[in-house]
Amino acid sequence: MRKFLSFMVVMVFAVTFANAQFSVLLVDDDQNTPEGAPIVTALTNWGGTFDVDTTSVTGIPDYAELSAYNMVIWYTGNDGLGIRLWDVADTTGIGAGAAKFNAGLTEYVANGGILWLDGLDFIYDLYGGAPDDFAAGDFMFDQLGITQYLAQSHQDDGTYSDGVEQYDKASANTITTVDPVSWVYSTLYNADGLAIAADATALYQMGPAAYDLAGQITAFYRNNIIVSGLRLGKIDPQTDLDQLISEMITAAEAGTFEASLINEVSKSNIKIYPNPAVQSAVINLSEINNASELSIFDITGRKVFSQAINGKNQVTINTSDYASGLYNVIIASGNETYTTKLSVVK
């Protein structure tokens, strides 16, 4: 199967990092013919601080390395097979809910790091083709904001069967100015057409208008996560890639995609046990005066629990249906808010 595919790009934007200057790490996870050089050129032309890490040489970067950067661009090249992005070595056809980010990347995202995931064919290789539906509890929905994998160009584009000719800028896109996006190839094989959650915003879609899959979304953002099918390493001309990367980083620096997180007043005033939790957790609030509401959010910013507590000293949370990962626990008390982390393991 030809592998001229679209990339899924994910950005997760940090609230605070130690870096005084905005910095970027390019993780080149392309296990086939390397094509990250144009991205390096674009980052050089951007003019900011960046480094490059190649997984085939240095292995999978851990959280300690990733957390030194405001943004990580994780580039998987022209295939979804054999990449180090996931927590398992071979994800071929493993299906819904089975794949998740590797440990370092999971922690990086959970702690607010900016992740730009740019990779070809990873949905196709995970699920064995379209269509697929995703809902709460599925990685694609919970982490990325994808509700449906609708189609793959070349496989599902009917009379064309030669791939998508271009990506057109969506009307809701106020972030980038490159329109349309095109590549060194006349068409892009196996681009993923997606449906997205109601609280997501489309950035790019398949085109032109006459194309069988025209209008299917290939790039979007949801809260602090951006997913796109841009295939950065093959965008042509280079000036378009330069402009696109510069505009996205500028938007990240400006907080355009930043999740609406509440300032942390104190961790010590909230006691959680056990933590990590499996089936349940007890949240002790005895050191917080006039606590009025308890809320829990997953790493995508989705509220998974809310309860009026009106001065209660403790609340027991049933975590049996929670997916593994980190959750933000937020307590409202008068004009102050208190927040800490709850870890759930299965």
Image: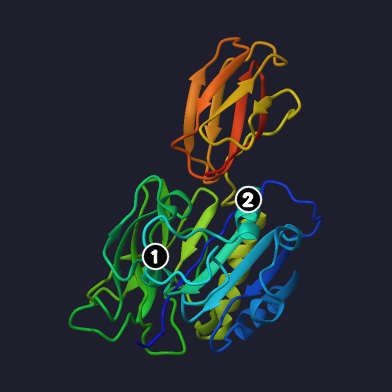
**Residue on which disc 1 sits:** 94
Image marks 2 and 1: residues in contact by CB distance under 8 Å: no
As displayed, is residue 311 above or below residue 218? above
Residue 45, quarter of picture? bottom right
Q: Which residue occupies the foreground of this view, 162 or 298?
A: 298
Instruction: Tell me if 76 is positioned left or right of 66 in this view.
Output: left
State which mark lies toward you, 2 or 1: 1
Q: Which residue occupies the foreground of this view, 15 or 236?
A: 15
Q: Is residue 169 visible?
A: no
Residue 299, quarter of picture? top right
Residue drawn at x 45%, y 49% is: 142
User: Of helix, strand and loop, which one carries label 1?
Assistant: loop
Please, what is the three-letter code of the amino acid marked with disc 2?
Answer: Gly
User: Of helix, strand and loop, which one carries label 2?
Assistant: loop
Residue drawn at x 35%, y 66% is: 127
Q: Which residue occupies the foreground of this view, 111 or 93?
A: 93
Image spot of residue 201 (x, y percent): 42, 53
Q: Is residue 284 visible?
A: yes
Q: CA distance from mark 2 to mark 1?
A: 35 Å
Image spot of residue 119 (x, y percent): 50, 73
**Residue on which disc 2 sits:** 255
